[in-house]
Image (cartoon, rainbow, N blue to C red):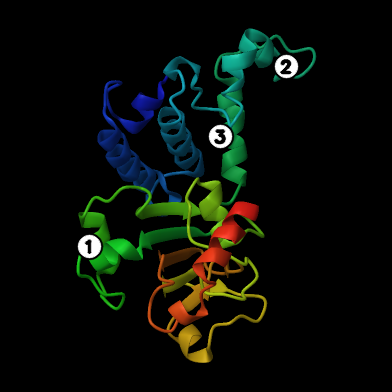
Amino acid sequence: MESPYDVLGIDADADEDEVVRAYRRRVKDAHPDHGGSLAEFKRVRRAYEHITAGRDPSTFDAHLENGHADTAQSGGAGAADREREPGTSGTQPGASGAEEEEDDEDEELGPTVEYLDYEVVESQGWELTDKDLFEKAEAADLGVDSHGLLVVEPQETLLEAAERYGFSWPYACRGGACANCAVAVVEGELEMPVSTVLTDEMKEQGIRLSCIGEPVTDDLKVVFNIERLPGLAELRLPAEQFDNARAGD
């Protein structure tokens, strides 16, 4: 059986940094826009999550959707049996994998967002206006919290997608009334369906709010964590309100 380490192309004793580097390399190669497939993209993501969650490698199933493979940990063979349709014996090896591949062929991948943390931009001495900003980020071999790819699902905001991936991007009101969740859209379009505190000038500069922003192009490049930039800083919720918003969310 293929292990999550096999999917990422690393040894089972790889350390955390090796896992992160391998994931960033494989998830880009697996993306449909880079010659991969949706099935492979999902498989790489599942493998990374399986490893970072500290799960037993032997319970990993590369052909199942997120969460299904985990039933092997708590339900054993019985859990697997419950996945089968009534009247089937489950004796056809690879059948579920083939069905998964067919489903993935019919399914379309949502908008893909390449993200970059502004703290990295500052620490490296880069500028938001650098034309090769994301090429620099790629060469810097950053961790997945700072730079990587995520896919936004239908009717999902950018912030919701980031949180689904386990990231803690800044936010507060979730309604467009502050700039805590502001991002700079370097490439692509992020639509905000309601009025916001952002000025027309800010919007012309590509500033958007991730809490209400939904991608309307297939590919985007955004820089998050920019809420302390001049102009935006004045539109943030005060620290106390921000903490309360997080705690009560």
The disc at residue 101 is: 3
Tell which of 169 and 217 is nearer to you.
169
The disc at residue 82 is: 2
Residue sitting at 41 percent across and 32 percent down? Answer: 52
Are the residues at dot 3 and dot 1 in contact (C-beta closer than 8 Å)? no
- Hey, which quadrant is residue 192 in on the image? bottom right
| Most distant residue in the front direction | 240
Q: Position of residue 155 (x, y in %)?
A: 67, 60
Q: Position of residue 87 (x, y in %)?
A: 79, 12
Residue sitting at 67 percent across and 78 percent down? Answer: 194
Q: Nearer the viewer, mark 2 or mark 3?
A: 2
Residue 7 vs residue 103: left or right? left
Q: Is residue 1 visible?
A: no
Q: Estimate how packed mark 1 is, as few (under 14), some (14 to 19) or many (20 or more) residues with alpha carbons within 10 Å.
A: some
Residue type indicated by callout 3: Glu
Check disc 1 and report the residue beneath it: 136
**Separation of disc 2 and disc 3 at Cα?**
21 Å
Q: Position of residue 211 (x, y in %)?
A: 58, 65
